[in-house]
Image (spheres, helix red, strand yellow):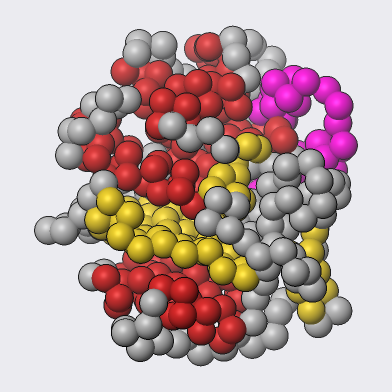
Amino acid sequence: MKLYILLFVILSTIISGCNGASDTPAPNTPAPITPPSYLTAEEAFTQVLQQHDLPAISGAYIEGDQVIEQFSLGVRKQGGSQQVSINDSWHIGSLTKSFTATLTAILVEQGQLSWSTSISDVFEEGEYSAKYSNVTIEQLLSHTGGIHSEIMGVIGWDNYFTSNDPVIQQRAQMSSDLLSMSGNGIGTFNYSNGSYVIAGHMLERIMIEQWEQLVSEYLLLPLGIRDAKFGAPDDGFTDSQPYGHRFENNTWTPVNPSETYSDNPKAMGPAGTINMSLDSLAKYTIEHLNGRSGNSPLLSQSGYEKLHTPLPGTEYALGWFISGTNVYHMGTNTMWYAHIGMDFGAKEIAVIALTNVGGDHAIAVTDNIIDVLLDRNY
């Protein structure tokens, strides 16, 4: 059970969504703690929160289709008095990738495209370098399509944060730019946010509908997830939702969701812009647990098995890292951090850990949350 937790730490540096904002390293992180098992969840995780000295944390332990334990603790922003609630939303960063991959699987089963649909099937000549002609959407979703690993290298990167052009148009331009860049070896795993931007835009062209609408219509709403939004959590008034935080001037500085760099640019949506409540993220996680058992109305058992089966020679499937029976992913835009880990062993379980900071502190506290959840429940 602890193997994927170790891998979370090892792989965290390549999972980050990049938002162009600096992330000053935080001071040395505290050692993890294991509160006594007789404490309530609130008491136990209050100790974890205090040990790591962060604004807020949240998490859940799931068995099968049941949330066994969950909590949300702390303040929505450092220095504020508004407490986070169990219904508050959290930015999930690159966990969004699994949503894009799951959406693709649903559309494949509906006959809208196939796993072998290629760049040349969807894009016009002149929109891509010839070497990418035969790269498939499956390769893009498995990070083996050879796309450049550094998305901030696209032309006019900073302009995407302030552009008022339609998002589909922005995504088309970003995809075309990525497909004209020299990238990595096709067929070799190399984690790339750009791969998911291109894959999401392929779905937009095929379905003639924006990715945000597609993921809502075909995945979120059928699961009863109605609070999911895109970008930094924001209900339109001050302190309505938790804020992300940067470490600046030796303290955690809240980032107002109205700030230009409060999240990845909208064009990066399919790679990492979803936010939602813990309850909704649990529903999505349960869907993957159920789906592997053949109990999903959205996607076949074989569809979920494909999403969870790594390509030969890699430890990445479609939107998920894989290690034995463990299926997991992390997400961050440098101001939030999110983990999902599932184990399809003898006892199907899942853990979720969330916080509204980024960097090493976020890795440490989410690992600590996962350890405590497992110690208390498994």
Q: Nearer the viewer, residue 77 or 368?
A: 77
Q: Which residues are magenta?
A: 150-177
Q: Is any atom of residue 296 visible in this view?
A: yes
Q: Residue at x 64, y 87 (%)?
A: 28
Q: Is residue 69 above or below residue 208?
A: below
**Of residues 258 and 37, which is closer to you in this image?**
37
Left or right, 297 with reference to 147: left
Judged by its main secondary structure, the magenta piece is helix
Does the stretch in magenta take in 55?
no
Q: Residue at x 81, y 46 (%)?
A: 237
- The quadrant of the rendering that contains the C terminus is bottom left
Residue visible at 32% across and 45% down in the picture = 286
Corner quadrant of residue 156: top right
Tell me the quarter of the picture where residue 224 sits: top left
Q: Residue at x 75, y 69 (%)?
A: 81
- Asked if residue 172 lies in the magenta stretch, the reply is yes
**Number of marks in picture:** 0
Q: Nearer the viewer, residue 265 or 117?
A: 265
Q: Position of residue 260 (x, y in %)?
A: 85, 46
Q: Is residue 23 above or below residue 196?
A: below
**x, y percentage for residue 30?**
57, 88
- Image location (x, y in percent) of residue 104: 43, 26
Q: Is residue 70 left or right of residue 235?
A: left
Q: Is residue 354 left or right of residue 53?
A: left
